[in-house]
Protein backbone atom coordinates (compact mmCIF):
# COMPACT_ATOMS: atom_id res chain seq x y z
CA UNK A 1 0.00 0.00 0.00
CA UNK A 2 1.36 3.41 -0.94
CA UNK A 3 2.08 5.86 1.87
CA UNK A 4 -0.11 8.96 1.72
CA UNK A 5 1.48 12.22 2.82
CA UNK A 6 -0.59 15.37 3.14
CA UNK A 7 0.65 17.94 0.64
CA UNK A 8 -1.48 20.70 2.18
CA UNK A 9 -2.63 21.32 5.77
CA UNK A 10 -6.11 20.16 6.65
CA UNK A 11 -8.63 20.15 9.48
CA UNK A 12 -11.53 17.96 10.53
CA UNK A 13 -14.44 18.62 12.86
CA UNK A 14 -16.17 15.67 14.54
CA UNK A 15 -19.86 16.52 14.02
CA UNK A 16 -21.08 14.73 17.15
CA UNK A 17 -18.60 16.55 19.41
CA UNK A 18 -19.41 20.02 18.06
CA UNK A 19 -21.79 22.24 20.05
CA UNK A 20 -22.21 24.75 17.25
CA UNK A 21 -20.80 27.71 19.17
CA UNK A 22 -19.05 29.14 16.11
CA UNK A 23 -15.87 30.16 17.93
CA UNK A 24 -13.68 28.27 15.48
CA UNK A 25 -15.46 29.85 12.53
CA UNK A 26 -14.97 33.35 13.92
CA UNK A 27 -11.34 32.66 14.83
CA UNK A 28 -10.12 31.13 11.57
CA UNK A 29 -7.87 33.72 9.85
CA UNK A 30 -8.49 32.58 6.23
CA UNK A 31 -12.20 31.99 6.94
CA UNK A 32 -12.30 28.39 5.76
CA UNK A 33 -14.72 26.99 8.36
CA UNK A 34 -18.51 27.29 8.23
CA UNK A 35 -21.68 25.92 9.79
CA UNK A 36 -23.02 22.86 8.03
CA UNK A 37 -26.65 23.07 6.97
CA UNK A 38 -27.24 19.70 8.65
CA UNK A 39 -27.75 19.17 12.38
CA UNK A 40 -25.93 16.62 14.52
CA UNK A 41 -27.87 14.27 16.79
CA UNK A 42 -27.95 16.91 19.55
CA UNK A 43 -29.57 19.45 17.27
CA UNK A 44 -26.55 21.66 16.59
CA UNK A 45 -25.45 22.97 13.23
CA UNK A 46 -21.88 21.70 13.36
CA UNK A 47 -18.80 23.36 11.92
CA UNK A 48 -17.03 21.91 8.91
CA UNK A 49 -14.03 22.61 6.71
CA UNK A 50 -14.83 24.18 3.35
CA UNK A 51 -12.15 22.00 1.80
CA UNK A 52 -9.34 24.34 0.85
CA UNK A 53 -7.31 27.20 2.24
CA UNK A 54 -6.42 25.83 5.69
CA UNK A 55 -2.94 26.92 6.71
CA UNK A 56 -2.64 24.51 9.65
CA UNK A 57 -2.25 27.42 12.07
CA UNK A 58 -4.21 25.67 14.84
CA UNK A 59 -6.19 28.74 15.92
CA UNK A 60 -9.48 26.86 15.59
CA UNK A 61 -8.18 24.05 17.78
CA UNK A 62 -7.31 26.47 20.59
CA UNK A 63 -10.57 28.39 20.18
CA UNK A 64 -12.76 25.31 20.52
CA UNK A 65 -14.08 24.56 24.02
CA UNK A 66 -14.93 20.96 23.14
CA UNK A 67 -12.04 18.54 23.63
CA UNK A 68 -11.23 16.48 20.54
CA UNK A 69 -13.87 18.14 18.35
CA UNK A 70 -11.21 19.63 16.04
CA UNK A 71 -8.11 17.96 14.65
CA UNK A 72 -5.59 19.99 12.65
CA UNK A 73 -3.25 18.21 10.27
CA UNK A 74 0.04 19.79 9.29
CA UNK A 75 1.51 19.53 5.82
CA UNK A 76 3.54 16.34 5.63
CA UNK A 77 1.36 14.44 8.08
CA UNK A 78 1.04 10.74 7.29
CA UNK A 79 -2.48 9.52 8.17
CA UNK A 80 -2.97 6.19 9.88
CA UNK A 81 -4.65 3.40 7.94
CA UNK A 82 -8.39 4.11 7.64
CA UNK A 83 -7.95 7.61 9.14
CA UNK A 84 -10.14 10.12 7.36
CA UNK A 85 -8.48 13.46 6.68
CA UNK A 86 -10.56 16.03 4.82
S1 LIG B 1 -5.95 25.43 11.32
FE1 LIG B 1 -6.06 27.70 11.03
S2 LIG B 1 -6.52 27.97 8.85
FE2 LIG B 1 -6.97 25.81 9.33
S3 LIG B 1 -9.18 25.79 9.78
FE3 LIG B 1 -8.07 26.06 11.76
S4 LIG B 1 -7.96 28.29 12.08
FE4 LIG B 1 -8.49 27.94 9.93
S1 LIG C 1 -15.46 25.90 18.31
FE1 LIG C 1 -15.74 23.65 18.56
S2 LIG C 1 -17.81 23.43 19.41
FE2 LIG C 1 -17.65 25.52 18.59
S3 LIG C 1 -18.45 25.38 16.46
FE3 LIG C 1 -16.21 25.07 16.36
S4 LIG C 1 -15.92 22.81 16.47
FE4 LIG C 1 -18.00 23.27 17.18
Image (cartoon, rainbow, N blue to C red):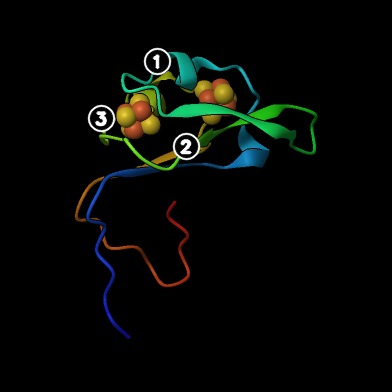
Residue at (45% x, 13% y) in the render:
26
Q: Decide if residue 16 is in sight here.
A: yes
User: In the structure shown, which secondary structural element does the residue marked by tag 3 occupy?
Assistant: loop
Residue 55 placement, left or right of 79: left
Residue at (25% x, 45% y) in the render:
74
The quarter of the picture where residue 47 lies is top right
Residue 81 image position (x, y, % from top left): 41, 72
Determine whether the beta carbon of the residue marked 3 sits less than 8 angstroms from the nearest atom of ligand 1.
Answer: yes
- Measured Cα–Cα span from mark 2 to mark 1: 15 Å
Looking at marks 2 and 3 on the same chain, the residue that comes earlier in the sequence is marked by 2
Residue 3 image position (x, y, % from top left): 26, 75
- The relative height of residue 29 versus residue 82 in the rendered view (above or below) is above
Q: Which mark is residue 70?
A: none
Residue at (50% x, 38% y) in the render:
68
Determine whether the beta carbon of the residue marked 2 sits less than 8 angstroms from the nearest atom of ligand 1.
Answer: no
Residue 27 image position (x, y, % from top left): 40, 15
User: In the structure shown, which secondary structural element does the residue marked by tag 1 occupy?
Assistant: helix
- The relative height of residue 53 versus residue 86 in the rendered view (above or below) is above
Looking at marks 2 and 1 on the same chain, the residue that comes earlier in the sequence is marked by 1
Ligand 2 positioned in quadrant: top right
Near mark 2 (Cα within 10 A), the count class, few <14, some 14-19 or many ≥20, is some
Q: Which mark is residue 27?
A: 1
Near mark 3 (Cα within 10 A), the count class, few <14, some 14-19 or many ≥20, is some
The quarter of the picture where residue 66 lies is top right
Label 3: which residue?
Answer: 57
Q: Is label 2 or label 3 in front?
A: 2
Q: Which mark is residue 50?
A: 2
Q: Decide if residue 65 is in sight here.
A: no
Determine whether the beta carbon of the residue marked 1 sits less than 8 angstroms from the nearest atom of ligand 1.
Answer: yes
Amino acid sequence: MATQVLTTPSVTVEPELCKGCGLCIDACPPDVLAFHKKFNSKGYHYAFYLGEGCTGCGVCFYACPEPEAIVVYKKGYVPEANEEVA
